[in-house]
Image: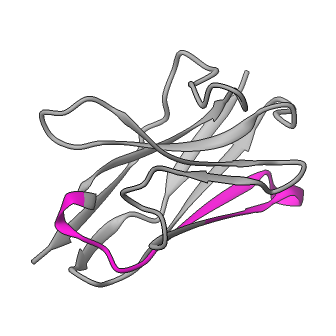
Amino acid sequence: QVQLVESGGGLVQVGGSLRLSCAASGRTLSKYAMGWFRQAPGKEREFVAAITWNSGRTYYVDTVKGRFTLSSDNAKNTVYLQMNSQKPEDTAVYYCNAVGIATMSPVFGFWGQGTQVTVSS
């Protein structure tokens, strides 16, 4: 049974920073990447970024490139999303999930509770 626990969200002003954490447990996920997704009110969940466990290779959507940075602590099975220069459009609930390295699509059909990020102007 895989568990995914997101944390680190909060309220931040435009231009501010937050660091999100995703702790994974219950199963070896090394053959996947770990991805972050977000869902803004009234919108569909969208892919944001991913990092592979083995090589640390990262993938970002264009809207966050240069502002968000992924890192991982393999010993803790934890992935971090450092979000800098935040914009109001970053406001969303952020979720993590394992993703296929080729597709960046979620592996598991369930989601954690997510963590709310609100960027105020």
Asked whether 78 falls inside the magenta stretch, the response is yes
**Residue extending furthest front?**
62
Q: Tell me where the magenta segment starts and ends, as one range.
A: 70-89
Q: How many marks?
A: 0
**Residue drawn where x is 83% and y is 48% of the image:** 53
Residue 37 in the image: state x and y as whole percent: 45, 41
Residue 84 in the image: state x and y as whole percent: 42, 78
- Between 112 and 88, the one lying in front of the other is 88
In this rendering, is residue 77 above or below 118? above
Residue 103 in the image: state x and y as whole percent: 63, 25
- In screen coordinates, is 102 left or right of 82? right
- Between 65 and 70, the one lying in front of the other is 65
The quadrant of the image that shows the N terminus is top right
The quadrant of the image that shows the C terminus is bottom left
How has the structure been colored for display?
one colour
**Residue drawn where x is 79% and y is 51% of the image:** 77
Residue 67 occupies which quadrant of the picture?
A: bottom left
